[in-house]
Amino acid sequence: MDLAFTPEEQAFRETIRAWVKDNLPADIAHKVHNALRLSRDDMQRWAKILGKKGWLGYGWPQQFGGPGWTAVQKHLFEEECALAGAPRIVPFGPVMVAPVIMAFGNRQQQERFLPGIASGDVWWSQGYSEPGSGSDLASVKTRAERQGDHYLVNGQKTWTTLGQYGEWIFCLVRTSTEGKPQTGISFLLIDMTSPGVSVRPIKLLDGECEVNEVFFDNVKVPAENLIGEENKGWTYAKHLLSHERTNIADVNRAKRELERLKRIAKAEGVWDDQRFRDQIALLEVDVVALEMLVLRVLSAEKSGKNSLDIAGLLKIKGSEIQQRYAELMMLAAGPFALPFIEEAMEAGWQGDYPGGEVGNAPLASTYFNLRKTTIYGGSNEVQRNIVAQTVLG
């Protein structure tokens, strides 16, 4: 196992770093480095900049218009974007549904949907979780009944991230109640402007409406929007979930936020406290260990070996690291981190906040938001059981 980057890979990193420096809007980078609210326009602007370059689908093979990068090159691209202050690519289109369409969709579906994803013009949402069907996705109840050349969809999805911006949504729907629950699920693409689709934002602990409920009331969906075969959607969902849980680990954002934590500690005068620096060091060890685990997977892939099935393990550790750096930032700022002021998420806001530095104002909101990470994408308790079964035997 070779974890060292080759000279060619280092040169690739420098190329990416220079391009991102020249093309990432400074106002967006400022917001990301200081955990301020990103608007739909901010996220879409960066997506379209990447799309114009051909890098929004940075993980795509060349046959579908992607750059055809290796696993290591994709990792370096993600790292340089994160460290520069680029927003995370909203993954639902380019990282999640696109690979499913490539692997299981027909040529017409690929030609119809992939260009809009690659350019950043079309915003996709994910319709997996339902009330009562979170980690146990096999229990989904949203029903799709075949009626001639279309399906009639009825049901509800929930925790739909950024669904208020969605233009299309990929959904797990139940098309059969016979046999095991997994065997009656299909994978359907739905236009969110269709009559009968309604979206209701859910206000979270941090005051943001990051997630939503999506309702389907007799929504007509053309049968041509079915991916692959009817009742085979569980197979396609598992293919997608491996991308989601690896993406959730987000080691590159953890490296950027670790540097933010150090900046806050120095600004607030706790950097010289040996005990506090011990806590930062322990966190940094965990971040490096997570990165080594990711690089281990990449090394195995680069050498043609099968990597361990550790997507769940990456998710567990990555989510715990996110919560830990949020906690340490709160501790570093002390009383200045305590006020929860929604307006503080807006760039340029200072108000009468006593610790009104840009770095302190959003800390409470970030802390509240990241309490979710050990729950979404499959709760960590469930993921530990999966890891025990697949890795330990």
Image: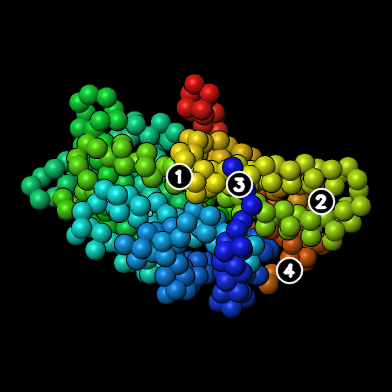
Residue at (45, 60) in percent of width and height: 69
What is the quadrant of residue 108 in the picture? bottom left
The residue that disc 4 covers is 350
**Mark positioned earlier in the residue sequence (2 or 3):** 3
Whether label 1 touches label 4, CB < 8 Å: no
Q: Distance between the residues labelled 4 and 2?
A: 19 Å
Residue at (74, 43) in percent of width and height: 285
Residue at (24, 37) in percent of width and height: 232
Residue 332 disc label = 2
**Mark positioned earlier in the residue sequence (3 or 1):** 3
Q: What residue type is labelled 2?
A: Ala
**Mark positioned earlier in the residue sequence (1 or 4):** 1
Q: Distance between the residues labelled 1 and 4?
A: 53 Å
The residue that disc 3 covers is 2
The residue that disc 1 covers is 304
Q: Nearer the viewer, residue 149 or 216?
A: 149
Left or right: residue 377 compared with residue 179: right
**Mark positioned earlier in the residue sequence (4 or 2):** 2
**Mark positioned earlier in the residue sequence (4 or 3):** 3
Q: Which amino acid does label 1 sit on?
A: Gly
Residue occupying the far left of the picture: 148
Q: Distance between the residues labelled 2 and 1?
A: 44 Å
Element under label 4? loop
Q: Which of 79 and 133 is in front in this view?
A: 79
Whether label 2 touches label 1, CB < 8 Å: no
Residue neighbourhood size for the residue with mark 2, other residues' Cα within 10 Å, grouped as few (<14), some (14–19), many (≥20): many
Looking at the rendered image, the disc whose residue lies closer to the viewer, 4 or 3, is: 3
Looking at the rendered image, the disc whose residue lies closer to the viewer, 2 or 3, is: 3
Looking at the rendered image, the disc whose residue lies closer to the viewer, 4 or 2, is: 2
Residue neighbourhood size for the residue with mark 1, other residues' Cα within 10 Å, grouped as few (<14), some (14–19), many (≥20): few
Element under label 3? loop
